[in-house]
Amino acid sequence: MDVGGFGFTVAGLVVGFIVGMTGVGGGSLMTPILLWFGINPATAVGTDLLYAAVTKAGGVYVHKKNDNIDWKITGWLTLGSVPAVLLTLWFLGNLGHKPEALNAIIKQALGFVLLLTALAILFKNRLLAFSHSRVEGHSLFKGSSLNVLTVVTGLILGTMVALTSIGAGALGTVALFILYPLLPTRRLVGTEIAHAVPLTLVAGIGHASMGNMNWELLGFLLMGSLPGIYLGSHMAGRVPDGLLRPFLAVMLGVIGFKLAF
């Protein structure tokens, strides 16, 4: 393994460890790291999407086994997200002959989504408290309006993920908490992960078909991240959440600001 390969494996290990320990979406950490390594934005996004699909597939198996997935909500989210992914990929494909413009759009979008993710991580507990204080034993949205809002949420997440590989994790979870405040946390998290797999898989295959993929890099990342997630999951709860969240939020906010502006 060369130095570059070793560096990517270590990056996968670190990101996997943080994801396992905090539950923060790997894309918000991995894609900026790949840019720092000098990988061009389009390839970084495409590679990270398939990386996310593989790592989250294992999470779906565990959550399904523990009955932590609401398949109806997953279906409504997917109804919005997959068409949004296909439309976004079509848009990016039309920019394929202008790689500089494509990479500029991805970097700008990445910056703004990272800023939103930082805010979601920082204010997650306050948003949850606000959501629960408003429901008073019933959901704010009901029936068809709730289904429509879930589809719209999927549409927004699909667009963000196809553009940046980020959004399905921290932002998706917060959106579900607001829409379904009465659903137990474990089922909301399981549902978000179940939705993230087809979303990142379709987006990743689309990017790969456009050449935005580095298969060797993907292999190195997975070599590090799979043991990293295993180790991190055993550390969950041992580091104070009040210390971890602000640190991650500030780090992502600084990176996002630099990319966006």
Image (tube, helix red, strand yellow):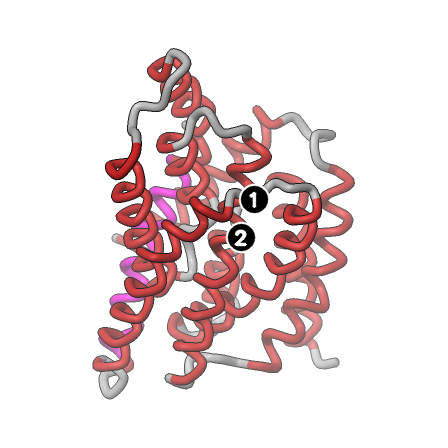
User: Which of the two discs, 2 and 1, labels the residue nearer the N terminus?
Assistant: 1
The answer to whether any part of residue 258 appears in the image is no
Residue visible at 42% across and 44% down in the picture:
172
Q: Is 247 within the magenta?
A: no
Q: Is residue 83 left or right of residue 1?
A: left
Residue nearest the observer in this picture, 168 or 5? 168
Residue located farthest toward the bottom when viewing the structure as drawn = 97
Residue visible at 27% across and 68% down in the picture:
88
Numbered badge on residue 261:
none
Residue nearest the observer in this picture, 86 or 160? 86
* Range of residues picked out in magenta: 100-119
Give the CA separation, mark 2 to mark 1. 7 Å
Residue visible at 31% across and 56% down in the picture:
80
Tell me where residue 96 appears, x and y as whole percent: 27, 84
Numbered badge on residue 69:
1
Q: Are marks 2 and 1 in contact (CB under 8 Å)?
A: yes
Which residue corresponds to mark 2? 194
Residue nearest the observer in this picture, 123 or 205? 205
Helix, strand or loop under label 1: loop
Tell me where residue 189 appears, x and y as whole percent: 54, 40
Dominant SS type (magenta)? helix
Residue type for callout 2: Ala
The answer to whether any part of residue 138 appears in the image is yes
Location of residue 55 with respect to 250 vertically, above or below? below
